[in-house]
Image: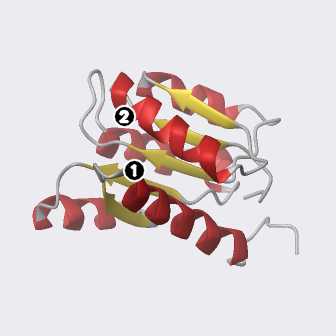
Amino acid sequence: MRRNGEIIIIEDDEDDRLFLKDIFDSLDYPNKIVFFDDPTQVVQYLLDPGVNPFIVLSDINMPKINGYELRNQILAIDKINEKCVPFIFLSTSKNPDNVTKAFKLSVHGYFKKEHDFKTYKIMIRNIVEYWRTSLTPGASF
């Protein structure tokens, strides 16, 4: 994990992507924000040795492959796991079964998407600030 690395957002819904873009624009972090609307492109991107993301925020319910399947693919590849990138789900669901399923995949967080800009912005800021101060393998101290 690199504190100044990319913030990767995997979200198939255009309105949700625009909402998150507005939130990150207002937070003014120096990190490059990289959006993926197709989760099947993420593994190849993460395999690039020049890509050292700060954090991954992923939706769960997506076409082609869902967030759980994507997380399983990532967990199966040592070259990606060695980058120690926090992987967090953002979902519309608060279903306890979904949360349990997510944590069985060693996610680093599961958060419900908010509809209110201010509330969602506070949540995103809290997530980013937590990981900015967390010590992880590969982080510059």
- Which of the marked residues, 2 or 1, is nearer the chain's N terminus? 2
Q: Is residue 103 left or right of residue 43?
A: left
Secondary element at tag 2: helix
Q: Nearer the viewer, residue 141 or 70?
A: 141
Q: Could you tell me residue 86's position as x and y percent?
A: 56, 60
Q: Is residue 55 left or right of residue 68?
A: right
Q: Nearer the viewer, residue 65 or 5?
A: 5
Amino acid type shown at disc 2: Asp
* Residue occupying the far right of the picture: 141
* Residue at x 26% of width, y 23% of height: 63
When the figure is inspected, residue 135 is found, relative to residue 62, above or below; the finding is: below
Q: Quadrant of residue 3?
A: bottom right
* Residue at x 54% of width, y 48% of height: 56
Q: Nearer the viewer, residue 120 or 69?
A: 120
Secondary element at tag 1: helix
| Residue 136 visible in the current orientation | no
Q: Which residue is mark 1?
A: 117
Q: Classify the position of the C terminus by image quarter.
A: bottom right
Q: Could you tell me residue 28's position as x and y percent?
A: 71, 49
Q: Nearer the viewer, residue 25 or 73?
A: 25
Q: Which residue is mark 2?
A: 16
Image coloring type: secondary structure
Q: Could you tell me residue 96's position as x and y percent?
A: 13, 67
